[in-house]
Amino acid sequence: MFTTTITPRIGDTDGLRHINNNVVPIWFETARNPIFRIFVPNLELTYKKWNLILAHTETNYIKQIYFGYDVEIRTYVSRIGNSSFTIIQEVWQNGQLRCSGLATMVHFNFIKQKSERIPDDVRKELEKHLITEKELKIKNDKEMKENKKHIEEFDYIESDM
């Protein structure tokens, strides 16, 4: 698992201090940088070096996300195929899962304009972050149950109450 902490900006919000739905996919892309580095360590954006394309994304909004509290983006690998792999990403705020998403990435040769097999060394790095959706659900259910025992969930700043 990779984790990325993001501090929401005023510009990420709507009039009620909710994070706008358009912002989460941008956060997810930012949190995929460690995955990108597995494929292209220096993140060089040239046709000869860059070798990933985004084939599919999906975002599921579970609970509202608010301005005024940092969010943690968790990034996992859930499937590794021949030339593609799937990433699960989550937004956590105040100990609660707020949003989840999937992204399918393809190892791609831009010069030849075709997908290519994921190299073995890259595959081994991806496998370090592999988790099934079932394993993740069990882990998350346990964590959220524990968090409810230890923290009070704040969705609003006290002045809103």
Image: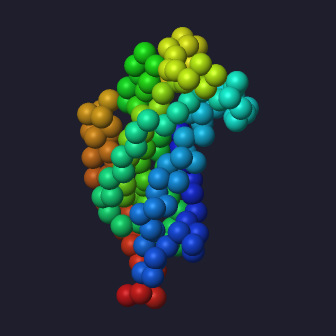
Q: Nearer the viewer, residue 160 or 44?
A: 44
- Residue at position x 60%, y 33% in the image: 36
Q: Is residue 124 visible?
A: no
Q: Could one spot residue 161 in this view of the protein?
A: yes
Above/below status of 101 relative to 95: above
Residue 19: which quarter of the image? Answer: bottom left
Residue 99 place in picture, x, y as percent: 37, 55
**Would you say 25 lies left or right of 153 here?**
right
Q: Residue at x 44, y 24 (%)?
A: 84
Q: Is residue 52 left or right of residue 61?
A: right
- What scheme was used to colour the molecule? rainbow
Compared with 129, 16 (above or below) is: below
**Residue name at image x 70 percent, y 35 percent:** 45
Residue at image x 32%, y 63%?
Answer: 63
Quadrant containing the C terminus in the rendered view: bottom left
How far across and down, in percent of the image, does residue 43 sit? 69, 34
Q: With 22 as the anchor, is 44 left or right in this view?
A: right
The image shows a total of numbered marks equal to: 0
